[in-house]
Image: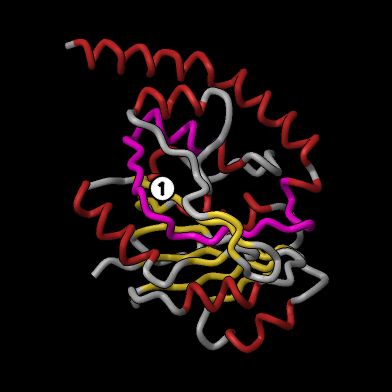
Amino acid sequence: MSRVSIIIPFYNCPFIDQAIESALNQTYKNVEVIVVNDGSTEYSEKIIPFKSQIRYLEKENGGTASALNLGIKNSTGDYFTWLSSDDIYYKDKVLKQLTFMKEKNAYFSYTNYSLINADNHDIAQMAGKCFNNKIDVLQNLRNENHINGCTVMMKMQVFSAIGIFNENLKFTQDYDFWLRALQNYEIYYLHDQLVKYRVHNRMGTRKFSEYLIKEVEILRERYDDKLIRIINHEKKHMKN
């Protein structure tokens, strides 16, 4: 029975208890929940009631990528998932996605998601972008990151093959990783909403949007030629 590692990076987030609870309440039971405290100064007390049920790691503040990487290095799972401390997994997230991946013999997959607000009220259903074919997915990734990190599930072997998250990137470490992964693996999409993505005033994408935009530009320059080559290859393959 495959073991799934759910890694939760945590930094001063008031919703951490809800994230941990959703990870522990998965219908698929062979999971390990690893919470990485990235030098928090607030809300750490919300983790205390769960400490007997999770693996808890502490480190100096270094950003999401460094917290994820520490969790990966300490994980024992066959599969990796990432849950942001302000988001929530649907209770059947792991079971549905793992089943899907095994059916497809996939190494990398992502899903759709819904939106909630700070009070857990629904904002939108099926909020993620979806595309008709692989070429459209690749074309969109040339311009933006539509893959929500908390919807991703990967085999742990992916990290052995292409490395871990880039700790020099504070806001786009996920985008960079997907752009590396797609050069080596087929990216599978499951059209189910399995994550509740929380939209609130404290979220990093709002607070640091200027820095995020700069990092996106760096990644576009770094990977665009590679993406174009892959897209052209796919087009030739479709014609044949």
| 132 to the left or right of 18 | left
In the rendered image, which quarter contains the N terminus? bottom left
Query: Residue placed at 58% from the left, 85% from the top?
Result: 50
- List x then y, in percent, for residue 229: 40, 13
Q: Quadrant of residue 21?
A: bottom right
**Label 1 is placed on what type of residue?**
Tyr
In the image, residue 202 lies in the stretch drawn in magenta: yes
Instruction: Using the image, determine if residue 159 lies above or below residue 116.
Output: above
- Residue 186 in sight from this viewpoint: yes
Query: Residue placed at 52% from the left, 79% from the top?
Result: 54
Furthest-left residue in view? 240
- List x then y, in percent, for residue 186: 32, 35
- List x then y, in percent, for residue 104: 21, 47
| Residue at the disc numbered 1 | 110
Query: Residue placed at 33% from the left, 60% from the top?
Result: 78
Q: Quadrant of residue 185?
A: top left
Instruction: Using the image, determine if residue 87 lies above or below residue 160.
Output: below
In the image, residue 111 lies in the stretch drawn in magenta: no
- Residue 9 in sight from this viewpoint: no
**Observer-nearest residue: 92 or 61?**
92
| 205 to the left or right of 107 | right
Query: Residue placed at 81% from the left, 73% from the top?
Result: 42
Classify 10 Å Cα crowding around label 1: few (below 14), some (14-19), many (20 and above). Answer: many
Q: Quadrant of residue 198?
A: bottom right
Element assignment for label 1: strand
Instruction: Using the image, determine if residue 129 lies above or below residue 120.
Output: above
**Observer-nearest residue: 157 or 172?**
172
Q: Which residues are magenta?
A: 176-205
| 64 to the left or right of 92 | right
In the rendered image, which quarter contains the C terminus? top left
